[in-house]
Amino acid sequence: MADTSQYESNGGAKKILLLKPRGFCAGVVRAIDIVNLALEYCGAPIYVRKEIVHNTRVVADLSAKGAVFVDSLEEVPSGAMVIYSAHGVSPEVRQRAVERELRVIDATCPLVTKVHLEAIRFARQGYSILLIGHKDHDEVIGTLGEAPDQTLLVSSVEDVATLNLRDSERVAYLTQTTLSLDEASGIIAALKQRFPKIEGPPAQDICYATENRQVAVKAVAPRADLLLVVGSPNSSNSNRLVEVAGNLNMPGHLIEDQSEIDEAWLENTRTVAVTAGASAPEHLVQQVIQHLRSRGFSELDEVEIVPEDVRFALPQELILLAPALARQPVQ
């Protein structure tokens, strides 16, 4: 917790620590751009399977522009255009799209695609695959679908003890990209203890943006009394930021926007840290800042923990629809 003695000498000024990096990651920017460009070049309606990213404000904004969000491909008219969300889909979904002659644009985050490819590789090599992640999350559902007969979901250290594998000598693990680093490392350690020969991906599956935002929270925890995380309740990486704060004894709350700030949280609070999950728009963060300013938090300090400048190229199927995009250099 913060040492409030520093405020006594400056009249008790209240401070906001605005964390950087925060908000949109490269995969989210790419996914939203894909929907917007598809609407621009093809016109409404454009169908999107599941939420393009896990943020209700983003989904509402795209819906107003003509995007139609559906839970199943059966809701998409035969022959229509459909966009897969950033969380990825299983081979079964892809096959169903072919059968229904749908025109597909794949907005799966490239870092999620990396995990899918690792699952395919391990499956072809005959491994039992242990996928570390949260049950029923869209990303996990898609990854499990790559090799359903060879993959088991592991959601906690306790799950490790109950695993019953056909060959404990040939085991591999993968992780959901939006997990808590501490949570994942604990499960991985338990897996390595039980299966000494277990193999993992060449590089960690937890994405750079998830890691960077968690590292930023850890860095400012000693200086702050409270953490506000802008994000939607179904955003895994946003929820993990609150958990990271809690593990450091810093109260944290997930809010969709400034209207969800409980005034009781601000009582006896001198320093508020503010961040946003990887699918939360920046304008919502700025609204939170303005709200805090109106409550007497007059000092603003933007704290950059690690520089972040990652960009992903648009999918080829979208570029083919828009000749102007084909002339742009790939980022």
Image (tube, grey):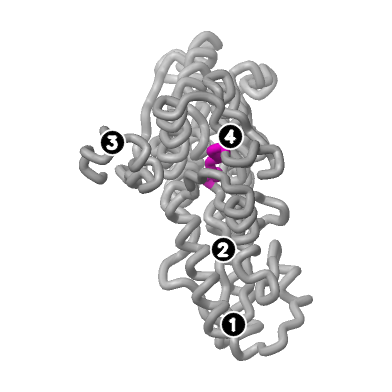
Looking at the rendered structure, the kind of residue marked 3 is Pro
Q: Residue lying farthest right?
A: 162
**Mark 4 or mark 2, which is nearer the start of the sequence?**
4
Task: Tell me how far mark 1 sits from mark 3, CA to CA.
Answer: 43 Å
Task: Tell me how far mark 4 sits from mark 3, CA to CA.
Answer: 22 Å
Looking at the figure, which quarter contains the C terminus?
top left
Do callouts 1 and 2 mark residues in contact (Cβ within 8 Å)? no
Magenta-tinted stretch: 80-86
**Mark 2 or mark 3, which is nearer the start of the sequence?**
2
Task: Tell me how far mark 1 sits from mark 2, CA to CA.
Answer: 15 Å
Task: Tell me how far mark 4 sits from mark 1, CA to CA.
Answer: 36 Å
**Mark 3 or mark 4, which is nearer the start of the sequence?**
4
Element under disc 4: strand
Query: In x, y percent, where is residue 301?
Result: 37, 26
Residue depicted at 68% across the width and 69% down the height: 148
- Name the front one of labels 4 and 3: 3
Element under disc 1: loop
Residue 176: name its quadrant.
Answer: bottom right
Mark sitting on residue 127: 1
Looking at the rendered structure, the kind of residue marked 1 is Tyr
**Dot 4 corresponds to which residue?**
47
Q: Total label count?
A: 4
**Dot 2 corresponds to which residue?**
175
Q: Nearer the viewer, residue 15 or 283?
A: 283
Element under disc 2: strand
**Dot 3 corresponds to which residue?**
323
Q: Is residue 38 left or right of residue 150?
A: left
**Mark 1 or mark 4, which is nearer the start of the sequence?**
4
Element under disc 3: helix
Residue depicted at 55% across the width and 87% down the height: 197
Q: Is residue 329 left or right of residue 92?
A: left
